[in-house]
Every structure is written in C-alpha cells, then in structure tokens.
Image (cartoon, helix red, strand yellow):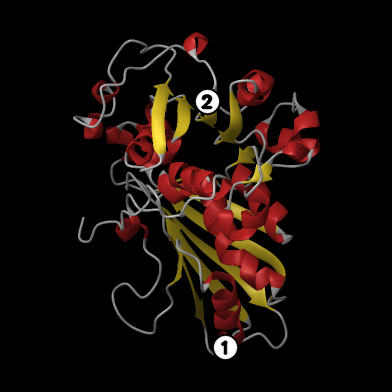
C-alpha cells in the first residue's frame, strides 16, 4: 500500500483528493491536515465522505514520513515551505502554482512576487501524464498544472506539435465558482454570483503563461466566471497554418490521444453533445477536446472541457501518482461523470 498525506485538506481541492484517495485500492490515507480544524472529523467539512472514513484533521506539526505528500497549499506560500515538505515524503505532488513556471521573471510577472526557491524549479516534472508520462515514471517532485491551463495545454499541444497553428491564439476561458476555492471573497457570494457572467481576468490570467510555456504558442487569455459550481470550458481561436485542414487536425488528435484513458476527442457534426461540455464531466477525470472549422475560413476554434477539481486538480494529481508507482492509471479515477445532472 502507498501511504499518503494531504496538506490543506479542508479546501475544495483537498476534499477532492480525499474523495479520490479513499476509493483507491492501493492507497492508505494516513493524514489530512488543516490549520484551523485539527481534531475535527473530515466528514464534518466534506459531508460527501460520511461513512467512508473516521479520520480527523491533524495539525501539520504532527506529520511524520509518507510515500506521497499531496500539497493543496496556497500559491506564494508553498515555495517558501517546499524544503520542509520535501523532508516529509519520498514523492511530493504540488497543486499550487509555485512550481509550474520554469522562469522566475515570468513567475513574478504573473504572481506579483519574486520566486523564493528558484533553485528547485528545474527539479519538478509537469504533472500532465498525457505529455510527460515517461518523466513521471521516476519523478519524485511533481507540479500539477492549473485547471484552465490543463484544458488549454491538452487541446492545443497536438496542433502546435504538428505545426498546424500559425501565430497568436486567443483563449476564452469559462470557469465555475469552485475554482475560486473554499475561502473565496464577497464576489463569490450567491447573491453576487447567481446569474452572473463576470469577466474577472480580461487579460493576463496566470494560466496564460502555463499554456504558452507548454505549447510554445503566443497566448492571449480572458477568464470569465459563470454560474456553474464545477467545470472549465475553453474556446481557443487560432489561424491555421498553410495546408492544415480537418483531416490533419483529426489526425494530430488521434495520434496524440488515441490510447489515452482520460482524453477524448469530441468533435461531431450533429447532436446536443457534439462538442466538449463541462457539465457531463462533473466528478470525472476526463478532459474532452474538440474543434470546429468554418468553411472557407483560415481559422479554427478549439474547444476543451474538464472538471476543474478533478482532471484540473486532484484527479490529475492521483493519475500522476499512479504513473509514478507503476499502477493502472484508472485506479481511483473510474467515475465517469453524470448525465443528466
């Protein structure tokens, strides 16, 4: 059994990590921390876990040593504490933003503070199995991409690698309220969020830098909060390179994801669900990618969707653990989503 601990387990991402890990056949969930709730039962904060565990939240100073440590800890704080975290486990899987960007100047530009552990940046492997599986097999320091970044990277990388996109890509991202975390401010009160389509990042959302770093494409990203609780959907608009067409696009996706357990190409000519839709992915570890062409136009619209808390966070982290420890990648991640919901 793989002995694991989750730091920051009281938040939404932490709760999803607990949910997935408790159903994993090869995992012993040994500890879950919270700074303010230690001693309380986990299911008091995450009521969906009632009857699944008697584990209580523990303070961080009571941690010992684990096979895997999952970090659902805040951006900007995690990098300062990383040396401490690395002493607690053989494998550290970080879900903060602090080790996603390889360049310190880019990090400071998007996060607003200097990076305090630049010497560690090159030691982390990007936690996206579809693109970094070989490196993850031996990685003990893993940085999981952001939710919108994962959707953008998975949908654009096959086209970028095949040379099918020319020039800048504009990304229109929509996200549910859970993406703001369990301690979001007044802007996420129901009275403010209900019925709203709020553009909270008209320019320079931090996931823009991740997508650009991974794909090598110039990215311009806008992010909008929608009324949904879970889910991310991206519309990426790009100019096609000379000679690119529907056949070459489908071929690029087929080559990239034909054998992948959690990426599906969804681009059909008709039907209610002919393009990726985050609603039907709720609770699942799938990322659906698709595209649409306008006859006679030199542009493509690439569409992707996922559950921001699962494939955009906790599920992707557990998939990385499965790869690292030579386990079937679907372990703990078999849930397919709900329809209708």
**CA–CA distance in space, label 2 to label 1:** 48 Å
Please tell me how crowded label 1 is: few (under 14), some (14-19), or many (20+) other residues with Cα within 10 Å: few
Secondary structure at numbered mark 1: helix
In this rendering, the answer to whether 187 lies above or below 219 is: above
In the image, which disc is placed on residue 126?
A: none
- Pick the front one: 29 or 80: 29
Image height of 46 relative to 166, above or below: above
**Residue position for label 1:** 247
Q: Quadrant of residue 193?
A: top left
For marks 2 and 1, the one nearer the N-term is 2
Q: How many marks?
A: 2
Q: Quadrant of the C terminus?
A: bottom left
From the viewer's perspective, is 93 left or right of 50? Answer: right
Out of 122 and 30, give the one closest to the viewer: 30
Residue that protrudes farthest toward the front in the picture? 1
- Whether residue 183 appears in this view of the structure is no
Say whether residue 286 is visible: yes
Look at 57% across and 43% down and name the residue there.
144
Q: Residue at x 31, y 21 (%)?
A: 55
The residue that label 2 is drawn on is 66
Q: Nearer the viewer, residue 285 or 108?
A: 285
Marks 2 and 1: CB-CB under 8 Å?
Answer: no
Residue 214: % across, % down: 69, 55
Q: Relative to residue 83, is residue 280 depicted above or below?
A: below
Q: Position of residue 21 (x, y in %)?
A: 38, 38
Where residue 258 appears, as percent x and y from the top left, is 51, 74
Callout 2: 10 Å neighbours few (<14), some, many (20+)? some
Residue at image point 36% right, 43% down: 25
Secondary structure, mark 2, is strand
Q: Is residue 233 left or right of residue 22?
A: right
């Amino acid at each position: 059994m793989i002995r694991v601990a989750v730091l920051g387990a009281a938040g939404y991402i932490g709760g999803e990590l607990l949910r997935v890990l408790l159903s994993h056949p090869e995992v012993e969930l040994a500890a879950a921390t919270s700074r303010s709730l230690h001693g309380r039962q986990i299911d008091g904060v995450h009521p969906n876990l009632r009857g699944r565990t008697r584990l209580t939240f523990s303070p961080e100073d009571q941690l010992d040593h684990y096979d895997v440590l999952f970090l659902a800890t805040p951006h900007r704080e995690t990098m300062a504490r990383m040396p401490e975290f690395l002493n607690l486990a053989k494998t550290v899987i970080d879900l903060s933003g602090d080790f996603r960007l390889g360049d310190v100047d880019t990090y400071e530009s998007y996060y607003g503070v200097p990076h305090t552990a630049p010497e560690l940046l090159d030691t982390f492997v990007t936690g996206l199995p579809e693109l970094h599986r070989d490196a993850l097999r031996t990685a003990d320091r893993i940085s999981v991409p952001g939710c919108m970044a994962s959707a953008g990277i998975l949908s654009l990388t096959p086209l970028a690698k095949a040379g099918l996109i020319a020039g800048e890509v504009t990304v229109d991202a929509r996200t549910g309220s859970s993406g703001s975390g369990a301690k979001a401010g007044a802007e996420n009160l129901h009275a403010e969020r209900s019925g709203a389509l709020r553009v909270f990042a008209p320019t320079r959302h931090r996931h823009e830098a991740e997508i650009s770093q991974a794909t090598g494409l110039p990215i311009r990203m806008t992010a909008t909060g929608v009324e949904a609780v879970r889910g991310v959907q991206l519309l990426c608009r790009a100019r096609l390179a000379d000679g690119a067409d529907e056949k070459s696009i489908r071929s690029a996706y087929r080559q990239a994801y034909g054998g992948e357990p959690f990426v599906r190409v969804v681009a059909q000519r008709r039907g209610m669900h002919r393009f990726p839709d985050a609603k039907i992915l709720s609770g699942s570890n799938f990322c659906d990618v698709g595209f649409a062409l306008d006859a006679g136009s030199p542009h493509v619209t690439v569409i992707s969707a996922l559950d921001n808390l699962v494939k955009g966070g906790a599920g992707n982290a557990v998939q990385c653990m499965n790869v690292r420890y030579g386990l079937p990648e679907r372990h703990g991640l078999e849930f397919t989503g709900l329809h209708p919901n």
